[in-house]
Image (cartoon, coloured by chain):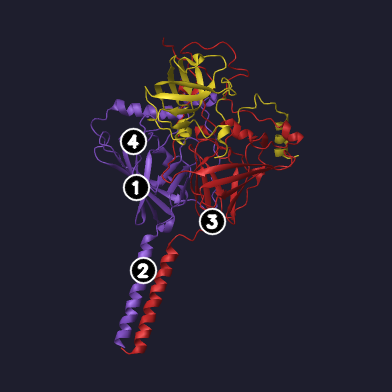
């Protein structure tokens, strides 16, 4: 009987390891509508480089005011926190993030690419160029190629993005898929003494959620202009 | 071990192997039961001679009297009066001002219903199909069987409310709740107008034909139908960001006649 | 009559300020879109930016050059995201590049061109957008 027992043990081992391997190969699905609640942000203050002056910070703040006043695309990091749910859709080639806002470009996180687009031909943008990969249960997204002159450049906790900034985000589902944790790390020695990290935890919206329409932004609306520029 | 034991052991091993392959298959993507529409697409011209020509190829809409009477306001950006360009030429350095500089409604990313020459991207997920252009927002086709909302309680919007289903290898999308507007081929639309889009892939997966059917007995004598053909972008294509700044004077300009060099 | 019908009835009575262009953020009525002219010259500068890419071209008199095309021209093209799908990048042209371009001239005679396509020195044809000549037929 001993050889038979050994054969049974071997058979069970083969099956179990096959199941284990396939479980590791399947990645989570972060598709859904995700809301950022008031208590879903943990943002420590950034340690800014001593070369960052108050004048530089004021200049970046002015970019924010201008982008909002003129309905410009705001880009990262604002896309991830516009006060309405994010629509995240995961496919085989990419993950797409759509915010409910008339001024946030769609984010494309490319799963089918391991390197960034050549700087010689990539037009820097407010969202940059994002490539993504799965590390176990975590989607790791690497973004470069930001345009420092466009959009809202200021970053939660302090600092701002430049042309040399690198952003790494780690998306992971928690609580059985009800929470989406996004750990955000900004790296730029000209702005930050050490990489600046914070975390957002989004709650999954109800299954029946349907994105609500939003007012299109009109930079020539006189009432809006008077509201945003009361001194003029 | 006797012969019987060897046979049993062998069968157990074979069964375990087959079961493990089954487990692996369960974790792999399901066989292609639906067409793969995900990825980037760009419209294809068919020798029309000009982009305006591509639109002129659409069959003209057969409108009712009510449809003809429905006036649609322009987006107000165009400032060129009728007959413009027939007056005295601008001096060197004097720009021709052609619009107010506004970037709305869809921005230069383009409409996801009346497609221009920029790219369009689709992503199919379990409960929703996304269609986005190269600007903010986009269209969501709800695939979870939900009905359209009560239009009397729905705020019409740029893209309305869309539900979709797969009919064989065709994605069929129904949309209502659009704002009043124009439709290619001289058509019109209002929130009650129903747009049916049928997305059909070529057999090699490289071309996508979208058939648009606008139905509204108040506006149309008969459903208004036209097609737009798209070509799949190379796999390494990526979405571009169409920057637009209404405060930039360049946004209002067309030609700036240069100083002439002798 | 419910609220929606009232709104629709009112819409039927509205005479709009203008029908508005269906697809362009500005129309091209300044250009003679029925006339295609061939220009042969050299790139002076190339501005790869939105809302429209522009480049300046010098056309000198010479054999095979239509005298009416001689001069310095501003060439208006499409937005960067439209042109990128036709193979353009910000490195496509540089000052000094010889090109042949086909486009629509301004109606008032000023030196502006709405480009249809250009041909680079190596024979590569670069289109402004998806439109192709009628002679090319279906793609």
Q: Which mark is residue A119?
A: 4
Q: Are marks 2 and 3 on the same chain?
A: no
| Palette colour of chain A | purple
Q: Is residue C72 above or below residue A106?
A: above
| Palette colour of chain B | red
Relative placement, left or right, of B32 versus A42 is: right
**Mark 2 to mark 4 CA distance (whole Å):** 43 Å
The image shows residue A140 at horizontal and vertical percentages of 35, 49
**Mark 3 to mark 1 CA distance (whole Å):** 27 Å
Indicate which disc, 2 or 4, sits on the residue closer to the N terminus: 2
| CB contact under 8 Å: marks 2 and 4 | no
Indicate which disc, 1 or 2, sits on the residue closer to the N terminus: 2
Relative placement, left or right, of B64 versus C62 is: right
Query: Label 1: which residue?
Result: A114
**Mark 1 to mark 2 CA distance (whole Å):** 28 Å
The image shows residue A110 at horizontal and vertical percentages of 40, 46
Query: Label 3: which residue?
Result: B34
Q: Nearer the viewer, mark 2 or mark 4?
A: 4
| CB contact under 8 Å: marks 2 and 3 | no
Question: Label 2 neighbourhood size at 10 Å, few (<14), some (14-19), many (20+)?
Answer: some
Q: Are marks 4 and 1 on the same chain?
A: yes
Q: Are marks 1 and 2 on the same chain?
A: yes
């Amino acid at each position: 009987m001993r050889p038979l027992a050994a054969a049974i043990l071997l058979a069970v081992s083969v099956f179990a390891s096959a199941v284990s391997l396939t479980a590791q190969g399947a990645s989570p699905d972060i598709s859904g509508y995700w809301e950022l609640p008031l208590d879903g942000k943990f943002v420590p203050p950034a340690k800014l480089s001593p070369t960052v002056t108050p004048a530089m910070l004021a200049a970046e703040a002015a970019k924010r005011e201008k982008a909002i006043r003129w309905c410009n695309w705001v880009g990262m990091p604002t896309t991830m926190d516009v006060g309405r749910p994010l629509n995240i859709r995961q496919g085989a080639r990419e993950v797409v993030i759509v915010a409910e806002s008339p001024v946030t470009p769609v984010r494309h996180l490319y799963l089918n690419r391991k390197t960034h687009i050549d700087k010689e031909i990539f037009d820097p943008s407010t969202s940059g160029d994002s490539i993504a990969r799965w590390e176990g249960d975590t989607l790791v997204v690497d973004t470069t190629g930001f345009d420092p002159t466009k959009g809202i450049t200021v970053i939660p906790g302090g600092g701002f993005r430049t042309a040399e900034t690198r952003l790494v985000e780690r998306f992971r589902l928690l609580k059985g898929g009800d929470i989406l944790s996004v750990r955000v790390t900004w790296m730029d020695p000209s702005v930050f003494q050490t990489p600046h990290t914070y975390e957002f935890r989004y709650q999954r919206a109800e299954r029946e959620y349907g994105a609500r329409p939003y007012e299109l932004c009109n930079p020539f609306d006189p009432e809006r202009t008077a509201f945003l520029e009361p001194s003029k | 071990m006797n012969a019987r034991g060897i046979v049993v052991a062998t069968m157990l091993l074979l069964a375990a192997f087959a079961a493990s392959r089954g487990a692996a298959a369960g974790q792999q993507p399901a066989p292609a039961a639906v067409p793969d529409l995900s990825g980037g697409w760009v419209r294809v011209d068919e020798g029309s001679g000009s982009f305006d020509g591509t639109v002129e190829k659409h069959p003209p809409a057969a409108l009712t009297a009510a449809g003809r009477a429905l006036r649609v306001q322009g987006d107000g950006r165009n400032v060129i009066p009728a007959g413009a360009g027939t007056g005295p030429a601008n001096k060197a350095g004097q720009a021709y001002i052609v619009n107010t500089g506004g970037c709305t409604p869809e921005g230069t990313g383009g409409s996801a219903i009346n497609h221009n020459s920029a790219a369009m991207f689709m992503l199919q997920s379990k409960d929703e199909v996304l269609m986005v252009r190269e600007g903010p927002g986009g269209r969501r086709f709800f695939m979870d069987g939900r009905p359209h909302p009560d239009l009397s309680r729905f705020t019409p919007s740029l893209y309305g409310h869309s539900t979709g289903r797969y009919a064989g290898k065709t994605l069929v999308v129904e949309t209502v709740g659009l704002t009043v507007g124009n439709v290619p081929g001289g058509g019109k639309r209002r929130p009650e107008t129903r747009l049916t889009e049928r997305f059909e892939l070529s057999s090699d997966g490289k071309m996508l034909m979208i058939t648009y059917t606008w139905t509204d007995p108040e506006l149309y004598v008969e459903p208004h139908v036209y097609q737009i053909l798209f070509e799949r972008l190379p796999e390494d294509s990526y979405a571009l960001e169409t920057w637009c700044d209404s405060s930039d004077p360049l946004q209002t300009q067309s030609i700036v006649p240069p100083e002439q060099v002798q | 009559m419910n609220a929606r019908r009232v709104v629709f009835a009112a819409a039927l009575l509205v005479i709009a300020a203008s029908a508005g262009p269906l697809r362009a953020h500005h129309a091209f009525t300044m250009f003679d879109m029925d006339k295609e002219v061939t220009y042969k010259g050299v790139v002076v500068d190339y501005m790869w930016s939105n809302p429209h890419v522009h480049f300046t071209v010098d056309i000198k008199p010479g054999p095979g050059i239509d005298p009416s095309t001689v001069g310095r021209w501003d060439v208006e093209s499409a937005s960067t995201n439209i042109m990128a799908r036709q193979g353009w990048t910000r490195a496509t042209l540089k000052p000094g590049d010889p090109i042949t371009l086909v486009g629509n001239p301004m109606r008032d005679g000023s030196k502006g061109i709405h480009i249809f396509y250009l041909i680079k020195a190596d024979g590569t044809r670069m289109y402004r957008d998806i439109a192709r000549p009628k002679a090319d037929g279906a793609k």
